[in-house]
Image (cartoon, coloured by chain):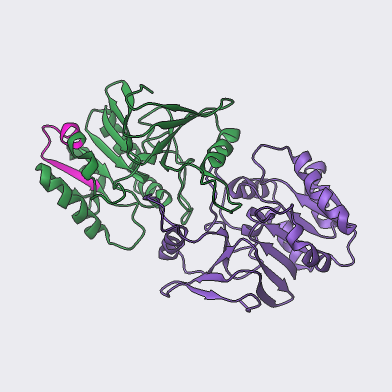
Chain colours: A purple, B green
Amino acid sequence: MNIILASTSTLFGGDYLEYLKEELINLFKGIDEIIFIPFARPGGISHEDYTAKARSFFEKINIKVKGLHEFDDKIAAVNNAKGFFTGGGNTFLLVKTLHEENLMSVLKNNVESGKPYLGCSAGSNIGGQNMRTTNDMPIVYPSSFDCMGLVPFNINPHYLDPNPELKHNGETRETRIKEFLTQNDLKVIGLREGNWIRRKCDRITVEGTELTRIFEKDKQPYEIEPGTEL
Amino acid sequence: MNIILASTSTLFGGDYLEYLKEELINLFKGIDEIIFIPFARPGGISHEDYTAKARSFFEKINIKVKGLHEFDDKIAAVNNAKGFFTGGGNTFLLVKTLHEENLMSVLKNNVESGKPYLGCSAGSNIGGQNMRTTNDMPIVYPSSFDCMGLVPFNINPHYLDPNPELKHNGETRETRIKEFLTQNDLKVIGLREGNWIRRKCDRITVEGTELTRIFEKDKQPYEIEPGTEL
């Protein structure tokens, strides 16, 4: 496999995907066209405009982008594609759509066969075992929370440290992930913005500029350095 | 109906339920025993300890508390109860448990018949039409997102205003609720900590110390004062 699962598409003050540019040139080496999966987007911009946003980045690195929504036969489109990018938005909407259109397993098979895959945020959540560690609001009801399982753990994108100054009684992100671990025995990668998971064949590492926080059942959470194997 | 749906059980720096004390004396007037529903709690403390926490508050206002987990026949327990309190925790776990045990509709029928009901946080979410505006992590998969519908709208408890200083790309609460409105045509009450919804017969008001933010499809969000009818 040849994949990147990024915490976010955009760093604060930066342009869309800009901080990942060198990584993406490498990920998609030898590929001149990819399919963009815009289904996480719940509004604000259309699938068409969202695809155009991805296209305007990828044309800088000489890769053409087609939106999956453009195809009548989406399963054939995925099977014929050379590589994939799933953008962020709402994970519930993305997972519901992929299951409804029978695309989750088709995409999984294509990525497992070696086609390069980039996910950002919700697009990274679906690379995990299931979507039970998303931060998103359950605005729609998917037929299942199962995802592609491209890595043997779950991801929490946009991982955020607690703010000690906040006079608020809502759960912190850490509390929420610990709640997950009371009901599930599965490692969770708390992926801060600026970091991504890189899988190349069987080697899985965490990369980027920040430490990464790891949560496992019956263990204290711990931090690992960029470059650490997962 | 005679209900309170509160944003939170505990204000910053305060004791459990303390800020609601006068309201709860009024809500449960003439009642000497209630059933506590601890099923939102995903760990940290047991159902037993969570019930003891509720009990230690309610004994101050001379109301006995029994935990619903103590009963072999939970449906009969709800049907025989004089009033209810559902505590906070994880809404997915609470809704999954209530549906599995066929308690959602039994509880709804009992509250609609006039028995007083207090919900906090997750316990307030289940008073809405569905749980699609919870903030919680989907750590388990409920058989349905439908809730009791004790009020003709949805609630977002612990409503939190955006922090303009946060250099983070995750969605704000307002963005998430607007995403909900792209997929659902249902009013959402952004209930800040310190506020609660009061229903007495057919009159529904928002009460507390803060303004309340209201979200409706195809409208700009707007703020209402405590005491406003919903």
Q: Quadrant of residue B230?
A: top left
Position of residue B180 measured from the top left corner of the image (x, y, whole percent): 55, 37
Horizontal placement of B130 versus A116: left or right? Answer: left
Magenta stretch, residue numbers: B24-36
Residue A43 in the image: x percent, y percent? 66, 37
Give the total of numbered labels.
Answer: 0
Identify the residue at image location x=46%, y=72%: A221
Asked if residue B71 shows in the view, the reply is: no
On the rendered image, what quadrant is the C terminus of chain A found in? Answer: bottom right
Nearest the viewer among B184 and B9 is B9
Q: In the image, is residue B167 above or below residue B219? A: below
Asked whether B203 falls inside the magenta stretch, the response is no
Q: Nearer the viewer, residue A81 or A122?
A: A122
Q: Is residue B146 left or right of residue B35?
A: right
Q: Is residue A55 visible?
A: yes
Residue A10: image x %, image y %? 69, 54
| Image-quadrant location for residue A71 | top right
Viewer-proximal residue among A118 and A210:
A210
Q: Residue at x 70, y 72 (%)?
A: A199
- What residue do we see at 60% from left, 69% from top? A210
At x 26%, y 33%, the residue is B110
Question: Which quadrant is home to the N terminus of chain A?
Answer: bottom right
Q: Is residue B127 left or right of residue A4?
A: left
- The front one of B62 and A143 is B62
Image coordinates for residue A90, horizontal then vertical, percent = 61, 47
- Report if residue B27 lies within the magenta region: yes
Residue B205 higher or lower than A103, as above or below: above
